[in-house]
Image: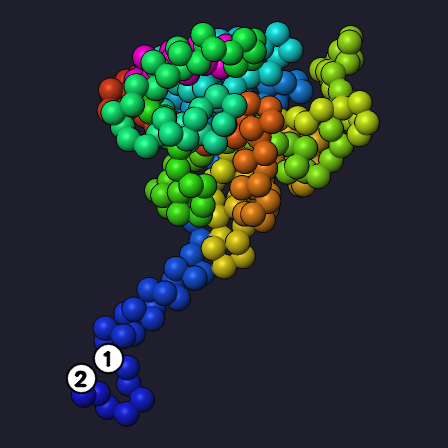
Amino acid sequence: MFTEPGILPFVRVSRFAHRLFRRYEVHEFAFPISAQPTDSTCGPTCLHSVYEYFDDQISLETVISETGRFEDGGTLAVFLACHALKRGYKAKIYTYNLQVFDPTWFLNHQIDLSEKLESQLEAKTSPKLHAASHAYIEFLRLGGILRMEVLNINLIRRYLKRRIPILTGLSATFLFGESRERCLEVPDGNVSVVADDIGGYPAGHFVVLCGYDKSRQTVLVADPLDPNPFAKDHQYAVDIDRVFSAIMLGVVTYDSNLLVIQPSDTKCETMDAHADRQ
């Protein structure tokens, strides 16, 4: 192709510009999040913030009271997902929890995941595994979608570039680089755990991913924890490798997942009608 000296062909310029854009690609959006009222309500608080992002009017107290949880107060992403499904949302979980799921179950979409979970319940006796498995069976019954894909920037980018927040269960112990935690026999007000590097255990946590900066290799995190070791407010940018590692290490606390919640067409119509009445 003939061009004047020093002038690149248009197609080459376009490709160069595209590569340059991808290199410095930034996707962030406003995502206000409330402070979690207790040590163990990070999950419902994140879920409530997702509802608010989609202009769904429901109080934080209601979300906390209606969300499934364990006796110690903790919850799982699948409990949050079931709550969203019952409110008319679409929900998809990307799991990396090998304590609950076998990778071969995801080799093709013809495999009945509920059937696999039922069979596993007969073979294993862990109370937490049983609670999680029953919740996943309910999640699938309600129409939830379950996937296991390689965790990388392309998966995160798939949603964030469309301004869809990603709720994630991860290891707070690794994310913050802090001591493991020990539960108090008698809670002190809203505090139920204390740092204990010897007698403590890894702690799980929920946050919402609401942006990323490709050139800096960071993810923007909305975090309900208050006070927060990373920032004075509830949002901070953190190295993407650290976030991904924290997500994978969430398997220790039955987390290790991404939860994507989106309004269904019916839900959108309901919310629009509610807004019109305001």
- The answer to whether 230 appears left or right of 256 in the picture is right
| Residue beneath the point at 39% across and 66% down | 20
| Residue beneath the point at 52% across and 23% down | 99
Locate residue 176, reporting x and y percent.
68, 38
- Marks 1/2 in contact by CB < 8 Å: the verdict is yes
| Residue beneath the point at 38% across and 62% down | 21
Distance from Cα at disc 1 to Cα at disc 2: 8 Å
Compare marks 1 and 2 and give the one earlier in the sequence.
Answer: 2
| Residue beneath the point at 44% across and 14% down | 120
Check residue 50 for magenta coloring. Answer: no
Label 2 sits on residue: 1
Is residue 149 among what the camera can see? Answer: yes
Label 2 sits on a secondary structure element that is: loop
Label 1 sits on a secondary structure element that is: loop
Assign the C terminus to one quadrant of the image.
Answer: top left
Label 1 sits on residue: 9
Which quadrant of the figure has residue 202? top right
Q: Please give the range of residues in magenta.
A: 130-143
Instruction: In the displayed orientation, state which residue is furthest to the left.
Output: 1
Which three-letter amino acid code belongs to the residue tagged 2? Answer: Met
Locate residue 184, reporting x and y percent.
77, 14
Nearer to me, 182 or 157? 182
Q: Which mark is residue 163?
A: none
